[in-house]
Image: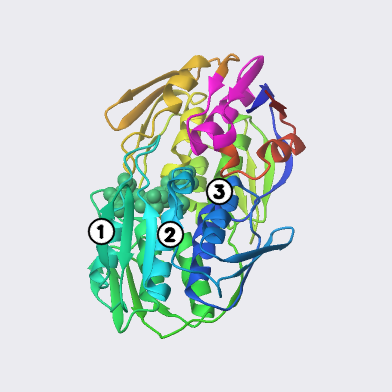
Amino acid sequence: MDKFIVQKSCPLKGRVKVSGAKNSCLALMAASLLTDEPIELSNVPDLVDVRTMAQVLENTGVEIDRSGPGKLRLDSARAKGLKAPYDLVRKMRASCYVLGPMTARKGKAEVSLPGGCAIGQRPIDLHLKGLSMLGAEITTSGGYIYVRAERLHGARINLAGQHGSSVGATINVLMAATLARGVTVLEGAAAEPEIIDLARMLGAMGAKVEGAGTNTITVEGVTSLGGAAHTVIPDRIEAGTFAVAAAITGGNVVIADCSPEHVQSVTDLLENLGVIIEKGRKTLLVKADGQMPSFEISTQPYPGFPTDMQAQFCALATQAEGRSVIEENIFENRTLHVPELARFGADIAVSGRKIIVRGPTYLSSAPVMASDLRASAALVLAALVADGTSEIHRIYHLDRGYEHLEIKLARIGAKIMRVSA
Ligand code: EPU
């Protein structure tokens, strides 16, 4: 199992490039099941989750050609309605994205129930509700979900759950609706940039989708979809993570190949903390002196402050002057980074939905354990300002969603090294 060895590295300086968005790419790959013509994706990040999704699709007979760096060609002409097995789904919950498109095109899909995960229970009831309202028959047995449908039909579906809109349910049901007979209206839909990216590609494939990026999406079903070539949008969470890396180290970093408008809630907050942000069309300059006041944030669906940046801002709060309050509203258990940050010496505690951080604290190096993807990023950020040499274990979580993080950080001056344990 690999680990990172990280030494205090202040300030970070230079230019770092953002890769394609993991969460967009996974949906786009699954959408290839909707057509028997090839889908060509560019700006595909080299990530474990992307490889897992490729395995899930190959398992159903999709032919995948890694036609060059950052490129994937997916040909679903020979895809069959086969199983997404437990071994793959337990590694990555987005495996259940095959349910919608597979049912729509082949009339059946079988996917292992994903179970809980380190950040919360994460049920998929809204995905199933949506598919059921489109006319699919859903049964579960032996830990598997079986979905069957002759031909899906349009429906008016409210996808809002108790935590607000669901990104995954919107993706799954949107894909299914493209091939359903008649009109589907998705209310309470997620408005994340990844949904817009998916809708754009579906449009290029011949789907009739309106309203993506708002909470009401209308889909007029068509009988078949064609191929498309599509470039994955930049990863907004990776961009946000680099912005925090610059801020926490008092650095001066240009974040290139990003979409500044997708990280507005993050950069607005940093600006309020006195960090200098200069936006270009595809770049963000983040310049800080390492001094900042405390802050209060509350995670919300897009365009609100993203839950996927919560852990990184917990790390930042350890260096802010005063009492910061960080409220997690999307996932009920996304706090496993808290005791690990405390191992660096952070004054941090969980109180209900809130994480309370008092700063600035002197952090000193420690061996710590990553518990999930974004928690891993928070530990790397804390290690960059902790005196001494830290070890971050279980970085396989990080490899799921950050492309070559240690190489990118090293290029802007971080003393970080991957070691195979
Ligand atoms: N929810 C339900 N029922 C459902 C689906 C979701 O109750 O059927 C709940 C969830 O348990 C959660 C809330 O609704 O409390 C929102 O979950 P959502 O469905 O939006 O999350 P997701 O689709 O499972 C995606 C990202 C996550 C990101 C969330 C929120 C992918 C592959 N994953 O998950 O990304 O945190 O949206 O923005 O797109 C990450 O990249 O580290 C990550 C966890």
Asked if disc 1 is less than 8 Å from ligand 1, the answer is no
Measuring 32% from the left and 83% from the top, which residue is drawn there?
181
Residue 97's label in the rendered image is: 2
Residue pointed to by mark 1:
139
**Pair 1/2: label in front:** 1
Measuring 63% from the left and 18% from the top, which residue is drawn there?
390
Expressed as whole percent of the image width and height from the top left, the position of residue 128 reads 28, 60
Residue type for callout 2: Tyr
SS assignment at label 2: helix
Asked if disc 2 is less than 8 Å from ligand 1, the answer is yes
Tell me if residue 306 can be seen: no
Residue type for callout 3: Asp
Q: Is residue 260 left or right of residue 132?
A: right
Task: Tell me which numbered mark, 1 or 3, is placed earlier along the sequence.
Answer: 3
Residue 49's label in the rendered image is: 3
Q: Which residues are magenta?
A: 368-397
Where 153 sits versus 193, above or below? Answer: below
